[in-house]
Image (cartoon, rainbow, N blue to C red):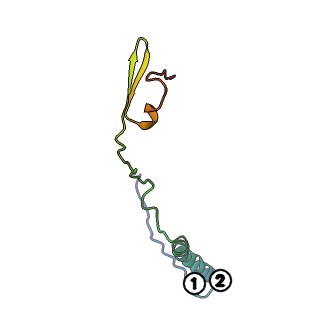
Amino acid sequence: MAVLFTDSFKRSFNVFPLSRSAIIFYFFMALLFIMPIVLVVKTHNFWVKSSTYTEQPDVAHLQEMLVLLHTTEGVKTISMSENMKSTDSPTFSVDY
Protein backbone atom coordinates (compact mmCIF):
# COMPACT_ATOMS: atom_id res chain seq x y z
CA MET A 1 0.00 0.00 0.00
CA ALA A 2 1.35 3.42 -0.90
CA VAL A 3 1.39 6.38 1.46
CA LEU A 4 -0.33 9.29 -0.15
CA PHE A 5 -0.18 11.93 2.58
CA THR A 6 1.60 12.33 5.96
CA ASP A 7 1.32 15.15 8.40
CA SER A 8 2.78 15.44 11.88
CA PHE A 9 0.44 16.78 14.48
CA LYS A 10 1.77 18.05 17.80
CA ARG A 11 -0.35 19.38 20.60
CA SER A 12 0.88 20.36 24.04
CA PHE A 13 -1.15 21.18 27.12
CA ASN A 14 -0.02 23.52 29.83
CA VAL A 15 -1.41 23.34 33.34
CA PHE A 16 -1.22 25.95 36.03
CA PRO A 17 1.15 24.54 38.75
CA LEU A 18 -1.29 25.24 41.57
CA SER A 19 -4.44 23.84 40.00
CA ARG A 20 -6.47 21.11 41.74
CA SER A 21 -5.24 18.36 39.44
CA ALA A 22 -1.60 19.44 39.87
CA ILE A 23 -1.93 19.54 43.67
CA ILE A 24 -3.50 16.06 43.69
CA PHE A 25 -0.68 14.83 41.46
CA TYR A 26 1.96 16.35 43.79
CA PHE A 27 0.26 14.75 46.79
CA PHE A 28 0.30 11.25 45.29
CA MET A 29 3.88 11.61 44.08
CA ALA A 30 4.98 12.71 47.55
CA LEU A 31 3.03 9.80 49.04
CA LEU A 32 4.77 7.45 46.61
CA PHE A 33 8.21 8.49 47.88
CA ILE A 34 7.44 9.17 51.54
CA MET A 35 5.46 6.03 52.45
CA PRO A 36 8.34 3.57 51.89
CA ILE A 37 10.60 5.73 54.05
CA VAL A 38 7.96 5.82 56.82
CA LEU A 39 7.58 2.05 56.54
CA VAL A 40 11.33 1.53 56.92
CA VAL A 41 11.54 3.84 59.93
CA LYS A 42 8.55 2.27 61.69
CA THR A 43 9.68 -1.36 61.17
CA HIS A 44 13.40 -0.65 61.77
CA ASN A 45 14.29 -2.87 58.84
CA PHE A 46 14.50 -2.33 55.12
CA TRP A 47 14.33 -5.97 54.06
CA VAL A 48 14.85 -9.39 55.57
CA LYS A 49 18.56 -10.13 55.52
CA SER A 50 18.15 -13.90 55.74
CA SER A 51 15.08 -16.05 56.07
CA THR A 52 16.96 -18.99 57.56
CA TYR A 53 19.29 -19.36 60.47
CA THR A 54 21.44 -22.12 61.85
CA GLU A 55 21.98 -23.14 65.43
CA GLN A 56 25.09 -24.72 66.85
CA PRO A 57 24.08 -27.27 69.48
CA ASP A 58 25.86 -27.38 72.82
CA VAL A 59 27.34 -30.90 72.81
CA ALA A 60 29.27 -32.37 75.72
CA HIS A 61 30.83 -35.82 75.68
CA LEU A 62 29.66 -37.77 78.75
CA GLN A 63 32.05 -40.74 78.41
CA GLU A 64 29.06 -43.10 78.22
CA MET A 65 28.45 -46.00 75.88
CA LEU A 66 25.56 -48.37 75.21
CA VAL A 67 25.98 -51.55 73.17
CA LEU A 68 22.96 -53.61 72.12
CA LEU A 69 23.66 -57.19 71.04
CA HIS A 70 20.81 -58.75 69.06
CA THR A 71 20.97 -62.52 69.46
CA THR A 72 18.54 -65.39 68.97
CA GLU A 73 17.94 -65.40 72.73
CA GLY A 74 17.08 -61.72 72.91
CA VAL A 75 18.82 -58.40 73.23
CA LYS A 76 21.86 -58.15 75.52
CA THR A 77 23.22 -54.82 76.65
CA ILE A 78 26.58 -53.55 77.74
CA SER A 79 26.60 -50.09 79.23
CA MET A 80 29.12 -47.67 80.68
CA SER A 81 26.37 -45.51 82.20
CA GLU A 82 25.58 -45.68 85.90
CA ASN A 83 21.84 -45.64 85.16
CA MET A 84 22.08 -48.72 82.97
CA LYS A 85 24.42 -50.59 85.36
CA SER A 86 21.87 -50.32 88.12
CA THR A 87 19.29 -52.44 86.29
CA ASP A 88 18.55 -55.83 87.82
CA SER A 89 19.51 -58.02 84.91
CA PRO A 90 22.17 -57.49 82.24
CA THR A 91 19.72 -58.44 79.49
CA PHE A 92 16.40 -56.90 78.58
CA SER A 93 14.22 -56.77 75.49
CA VAL A 94 13.55 -53.59 73.54
CA ASP A 95 10.26 -53.12 71.70
CA TYR A 96 10.55 -51.30 68.35
Q: Position of residue 85 (x, y in %)?
A: 43, 32
Q: Position of residue 93 (x, y in %)?
A: 49, 20
Q: Which residue is at the far top?
A: 72
Inspect the image, locate mark 2, and give the three-letter code of the amino acid beneath it: Arg
| Circles 2, 1 touching at the beta carbon (< 8 Å) | no
Q: Position of residue 91 (x, y in %)?
A: 44, 21
Inspect the image, locate mark 1, and give the three-letter code of the amino acid beneath it: Val
Image vertical order of residue 26 relative to residue 1, above or below? below
Could you say which is closer to the camera, residue 47 or residue 52? 52
Return the residue at label 2.
20
Q: Residue 53, labelled with which disc? A: none
Return the residue at label 1.
15
Going 41% across and 21% down the picture, which residue do you hit? 76
Q: Nearer the viewer, mark 2 or mark 1?
A: 2
Going 54% across and 77% down the picture, which residue do you hit? 34
Going 48% across and 72% down the picture, which residue do you hit? 9
Image vertical order of residue 51 relative to residue 74, above or below? below
Q: Position of residue 50 (x, y in %)?
A: 42, 58
Residue 78 lies left or right of residue 9; in this view the side is left
- The 10 Å Cα crowd at callout 2, few under 14, some 14 to 19, many 20 or more, is few
Could you say which is closer to the camera, residue 85 or residue 73? 85
Image vertical order of residue 92 relative to residue 54, above or below? above
- The 10 Å Cα crowd at callout 1, few under 14, some 14 to 19, many 20 or more, is few
How many marks can you see? 2
User: Distance from label 2 to label 1 (Cα)?
Assistant: 10 Å
Picture quadrant of residue 23: bottom right
Q: Earlier in the sequence, mark 2 or mark 1?
A: 1
Could you say which is closer to the camera, residue 70 or residue 57? 70
Q: Secondary structure at mark 1?
A: loop
Going 42% across and 37% down the picture, which residue do you hit? 82
Q: Which residue is at the far right?
A: 20
